[in-house]
Image (cartoon, helix red, strand yellow):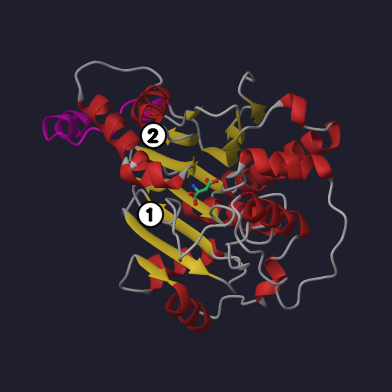
Amino acid sequence: MRFIALALALGLAAPAAAQDRPDWAIVIHGGAGVIERESMTAETEAAYRAALDAAVTRGRDVLDTGGSALDAVEAVIRGMEDDAMFNAGRGAVFTAAGRNELDSSIMDGETMNAGAVAGVTNVRHPISLARAVMENSRHVMLQGEGAETFAEEQALELVDPAFFFTERRWQALEGALEAQGLPVPARPEGAPEPEEVDHTLLIRDALEHRFGTVGVVAMDREGHIAAGTSTGGMTAKRWGRVGDSPVIGAGTYADERCGVSATGSGEYFIRLSVAARICMEVEIADRGAEDVPAIGQTAADMVIHGPLTDMGGDGGVIVLTSDGRPAWSFNTAGMYRASQVAGEDPVIAIYGDED
Ligand code: ASP
């Protein structure tokens, strides 16, 4: 009692509602876009729900056994990077030059340390490289060849760039380049023979443009929050383009009371510092005299349906606040998403009108 009184007097009070927070919580996204029931076959929908379920289960297994939020973020994203359904790691979209250039970042809310990589082409799990940058280098962000050299030094798993190749993304690139009147590059060395791709998927890819980036925010038993994001960026991106996903404060952010991972048109998320802006709103509300319920939701909606929409950007975010309550907000038709709070069932959703 004396300690609490002292802590309050010194302004050391824990962030709001931390006392009755659940043991742990996790929230995941697999990208946002024009994801509508009408353009989704039952099989594809079931496959996405199963992939989201597998992701949330992986996170739960880490958190439930006392693993850290950082470990949960890394484990879940590694799995999604290996799943060709998502635009991260294997299954990443192609640049206009026919390459897979991968971006990723991670942030530890407890220490506010962060690591990020951009434009890597041969690292199987860019999220683990981002974590290695955070933990084993003096830097926050590495790019291109230098990042790959660092990955080698860190003994991370390297793969032939053709490992990331999927026919679906290649055909999506061909469609995008033809639509823009740009030349289609040669099929990458080491790519398998061309094969038939489900037509409905290609039509959706053409409509959705940027979908499939993955992100996770987790809170562990200690109440620490971490966030991470991984992506191949945007189909047919040019000139070494880097989006928001590896930019701390834009695509990923975490502090002691809030974590965010974003997905959408990166150029807007960078200019608005979307992830940090949402956590700033949470901090302002948290420091205020009044108790604001569902502060993560309110802050996310404020930024996504406010400045992001006003500026013409589209996409969404997942948010987790220190009360252990996950939230999401998006201005697209849908977002692949899932969450779970200790002691409760997981929630898995795709379309805008769910939950
Ligand atoms: N935000 C990512 C980027 O701009 C793309 C996405 O989230 O789909 O690179």
Amino acid on which the number 2 mark rests in the picture: Ser
Quarter holding residue 60: top right
On the question of residue 68 being in view, the answer is no
Question: Any magenta on residue 15?
Answer: yes
Identify the residue at image location x=61%, y=55%: 181
On whether ligand 1 comes within 8 Å of the CB at mark 1, the answer is no
Per the image, label 2 sits on a secondary structure element best described as loop
Frontmost residue, 241 versus 67: 241
Of badges 2 and 1, the one in the foreground is 1
- Between residues 20 and 351, which one lies in front from this camera angle? 351
Q: Residue at x 58, y 45 (%)?
A: 210
Residue 322's disc is 2
Residue furthest toward the front? 181
What's drawn in magenta, residue-wise?
A: 1-20
Coordinates of residue 257 in the picture (x, y in percent)? 34, 37
Image position, residue 293 (x, y; %): 37, 17
Q: Quadrant of the N terminus?
A: top left
